[in-house]
Amino acid sequence: MAIIYGTPGNDTLTGTAFADSIFGLAGNDILRGLAGRDRLEGGSGNDTLKGGVGIDTLVGGTGSDRYIVDNTGDIVIEAAKAGIDTVVSSVSYVLGSHLENLTLTGSSAINGTGNNLNNSITGNNANNTLRGGAGNDTLMGGAVNNSGNDTLYGGDGNDVLYSKNFLSGSSRIGADVLYGGNGNDTLHGGNGAKNTLNGGSGNDTYIVFSTADVIIEAANAGTDTVVSSVSYTLGNNLENLTLTGNKNINGTGNSLNNYIAGNFGSDILYGGDGNDTLVAGIGNSDEDPAGIGIFYSYSGNNYLNGGDGNDVLKGGVGNDTLFGRNGNDNLDAGLFTDVGWGYVSDESGNDYLDGGAGNDTLKGGVGNDTLLGGAGSDLLISVVGRGANPYASVEYSGNDYLDGGAGNDTLQGGAGSDTLIGGDGFDSLVAGVGKRSEYSYSGEWVTTFFSGSNYLDGGAGNDTLVGSLNSDTLIGGSDDDRLTGKGGNDVLAGGTGADTFIFLSPSEGLDTITDFSVGQGDKIEVSAAGFGITVGDTSKFSFSNNTLFFDTTALVTLQSNSGFSPSTDIEVV
């Protein structure tokens, strides 16, 4: 039996084969008891205490201490708020008061249990059962490359459970079962084997690396998210799915209202039933080092299918295909958005958007997009600029195709030479603004530059068609339509029905009306303010050689003009 004292420095003290008392005093000490019933006291400092063979008592004192335990009878005494302490045990162990961390060693099937603190508990290479208890705990099934079948219980608190120790770069062979318990838990499935993940109550996150993993989630037990690096289909009671990595994988929802986000690759996303939000993945992003703006690029050629329900689908860079299917859907091929001082979004790509049935909103992006509204009253926009700053500037190009289909649709072209087809219903078709336009968005001004000659076809129904500042072609179709060519030398055809051809000023170019019919009730409507005349005054208009003049300015050519008279067929409003 020996009594051994250290110094105020960092000491390494070793006992005898008998019952020893070893006191480290100050400093970061290493105390070894060897055989016998020893008592080791570290004192102040970050000490390591190893009792050895026999039932030992280990007292760390102040500082972050490390206790080596090899006997179930060993006693560890730790003061409150005296550092972050770790027990390293080769036998099953339950953390006592004021002990934070536990690591199991060896190859025997042993168990580890936490307390009411925020514990970190790591298993060994065998089959372990780990219980966190109260507190926000971190549980790791294996500390090394291991084949053990572990069972992890998070308990109360917001816990993080790993089937293996990800920090060691190990690969997982065994099949683990992870229970999150109460709280918002994160469960990592690991690689290889079939793991079972059960989050319990709360808003849980499941990290999946293998298609073999099984997730069990209770009904009405929070809003849960699966984060997967492999193709994944959401099971029962799971709401959200995020794909990771850069492989071309797929994500599929269920009957709930799902949020599904793609990864850096070319993904296929399917929402299924419910009101879903599908977002193509984000890649190659970096922040401006000056802190002035953030520059994003959305990668991959993605396929997004909303399924039934009222869905939101958002594409990105690349050639994306978006299908809304049934329900009132919002399809967004990729939008410019200005945030902070400046934001530049590289969201080009030739996209295909199909709203399907329902009242849908389809928004194209940069590139040559195809937008099909389908049945229902739809809003189709070829490109959009949004400003969160007092001034934002957007410049776009792209030759887009917009088809509203059946229903009362609104089609808005943008940059480039667009084709707008209204289809059946009472439609509103608006081509790109032209060279430059300033407009207010949420009380702030945005300057937008557009270009291109556009083709607008209203189809059946009472349609409103508005051209750009360039030379456009506007076709009203059947029923009573309103056509405004605006700038450029436009070609206007009202079709059957009583159509109205609108002129806002005498300096918008020389337009051509191909089918003006007095008998059908066609009219030319002139803006009194834009022409600088009084309402109802047609005295300055004259008609000669198939051309209508305002004073000496040629305004429009009427290829079909039987019975046309400025005094009766022009309305000044």
Image: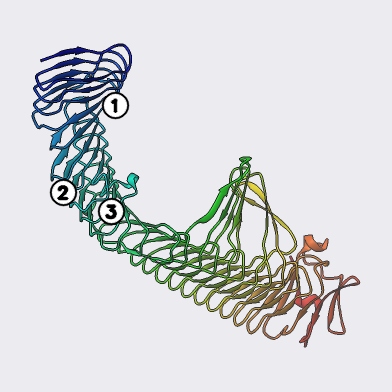
Tell me which label, 3 or 1, sits earlier in the chain.
Answer: 1
Please say if 108 is above or below 465.
above
Most foreground residue, 392 or 379: 392
Side of 11 relative to 328 (left or right)? left
Side of 141 relative to 312 (left or right)? left
Q: In the rendered structure, which amino acid carries the disc numbered 2? A: Asn
Query: Are there few (<14), some (14-19), or many (20+) residues within 10 Å of tag 2?
Result: many
Q: In the rendered structure, which amino acid carries the disc numbered 3? A: Gly
**Residue 127's mark?**
2
Rendered location of residue 248, percent (x, y): 43, 66
**How many angstroms separate mark 3 from mark 2 (CA)?**
16 Å
**Residue 189's mark?**
3
> Residue at (82%, 74%) from the top-left corner?
510
Please say if 109 is above or below 37.
below
Label 2: state its secondary structure: loop
The residue mark sitting in front, 1 or 2, is 2
Query: Are there few (<14), some (14-19), or many (20+) residues within 10 Å of tag 1?
Result: some
Q: In the rendered structure, which amino acid carries the disc numbered 1? A: Ile
Q: Can you see residue 224? A: no
> Residue at (27%, 54%) from the top-left corner?
172
Label 3: state its secondary structure: loop
Rendered location of residue 528, percent (x, y): 78, 63
**How many angstroms separate mark 1 from mark 2 (CA)?**
27 Å
Residue assigned mark 1: 84
